Amino acid sequence: MYQGFFDWLFPTRCLLCHDELQKSQQLCTHCLNDIEIILLPESGNLLHRPDISRLFDNLSFDALFALSWYQPPVENWIRGLKFHDQIHYKIALIQLIRKKLPEYTQQEGFEWPDYFVVLPLHPSRFKNRGFNQVAQVWQPLLPKHLISHTLLTRNKATQAQTTLTKKQRKQNLKSAFKCETNLQGKKITIIDDVITTGATINSAADCLKQAGAIHVSVWATCITPFR
């Protein structure tokens, strides 16, 4: 009874239009449908789109899937969750992934990887933040038996990438990851929230391929648009 009264007094409202919602949501159907998404080419691999492939140099990963551009409102939700511990944004991001991911996984010829790897934080950063925001958003939507928490580790406490140039990012991430598992012949998918220059993903993909992976794909929430 008290919970019902509280829900009536403080109803959940859409983050964008402020219409009243069910408690398990943060976005109404109309606003969810209005969010600008990145259209997939026929192959399903965003690296086959010239406007996207030109964003990255000397790629070590083989395929890319992403939901949206790194711009408002999705940018605000990621930053709020990542840097300000605004957990309610997690629900909005999960709603977006839940809506868009089937368009990719249900394409003809799609194959699940042998392992999913959520891009790990260095232990010191994880301790400081208290959670991995990428894992919180993506893991509820992935097949649990395919998720590996130990396959890839981050053994270098790198400087925050946001303030660095492309050249500095590459140097900053040199030997940042470690994989001690034999991945001979395996297909791996790395999960991340935002891809800008691709330096972090390249470093992780290099590590996985050195361990024997034959194919590394990347799933991301956002790509930073060319400016």
Image: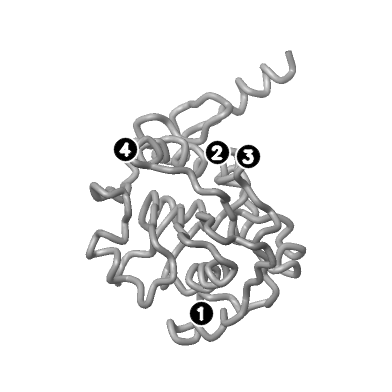
Instruction: Please state which of the two labelled residues, at mark 4 or mark 3, is closer to the viewer.
Output: 4
Q: Which comes sooner in the sequence, label 2 or label 4?
A: 4
Residue 45 drawn at (x, y percent): 32, 54
Badge 2 is on which residue?
141
Q: Position of residue 142 (x, y in %)?
A: 56, 40
Task: Name the secondary structure under disc 2.
Answer: helix
Which is nearer the N-term, disc 1 or disc 4? 4
Element type at marker 3? Answer: helix
Q: Nearer the viewer, mark 1 or mark 2?
A: 2
What residue is rendered at 55% in x and 38% in y? 141
Disc nearest the viewer among 2 and 3: 3
Give how far apart the Cα atoms at labels 1 and 2 are: 31 Å
Q: Amino acid at mark 3?
A: Lys
Marked residue nearer the N-terminal end (3 or 1): 3
Type of residue at label 2?
A: Leu
For disc 1, the marked residue is 163
The foreground one among 203 and 163 is 203
Q: Residue at x 67, y 23 (%)?
A: 6
210 to the left or right of 122 = left
Residue 194, relative to residue 227: is it above or below? above
Q: Which residue occupies the foreground of this view, 92 or 152? A: 152
